Amino acid sequence: WAALVRGLVRGPLAGRPVWVTSLLAHIRRPEYGGLFRGVVEGHILQVFDTGDLPGPALVDETALLLREQRLPFRLGVGAYERVLPSGSMTEQRRWFSAVGRFRALPGYRGLWVFPAGRSWTQLRSPSP
């Protein structure tokens, strides 16, 4: 994937700022940042629709991994909830409550909000 992105950045996307989407599984790989550093502007860590809830341990792990990758990032949060096949609701809003922790990290470049056509400015509370 990194080789393909490198080719696009040197070819058809030359001169344009390019960001890639990443997942927690990606940043858990020690080589991830090195594969993209100097190639893209940064990555958007998608934390919605992954099933990962931002408890203290996961937030701490994620912050450490982002710091270790040494790559500019935005936190990609979902501004919507949906019903899961189990009948329960997603709790994606909870990631908004962790923004302060990520904001303090080197490389933080803000939020990337996936609104799914919905207003998101009221999503400051983790409650649905």
Image: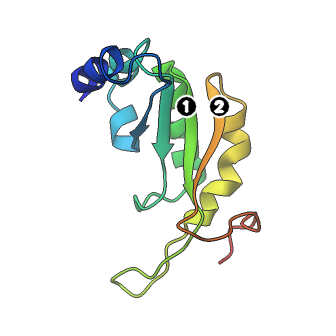
Q: How is the image coloured?
A: rainbow
**Which numbered circle lies on residue 109?**
2
What is the number of callouts on the image?
Answer: 2
Which quarter of the picture shows residue 110?
Answer: top right
Please report the residue visible at 47 percent of the width from the left and 23 percent of the height from the top.
16
Sequence-wise, which precedes: disc 1 or disc 2?
Answer: 1
Image position of 116 with respect to 11: above or below: below
Please report the residue visible at 32 percent of the width from the left and 18 percent of the height from the top.
35
Which quarter of the picture shows residue 124?
Answer: bottom right
Nearest to the observer: residue 9 or residue 65: 9
- Give the secondary structure at mark 1: strand
State which quarter of the image contains the N terminus.
top left
In the image, what residue type sits under mark 1? Phe
**Which numbered circle lies on residue 108?**
none
Residue identified by numbered label 1: 73
- Residue 72 x/y as whole percent: 55, 24
In the image, what residue type sits under mark 2? Arg
Nearest to the observer: residue 72 or residue 115: 115
Distance (Cα) linking label 1 and label 2: 6 Å
- Residue 46 x/y as whole percent: 46, 48
Residue extending farthest to the bottom is 87
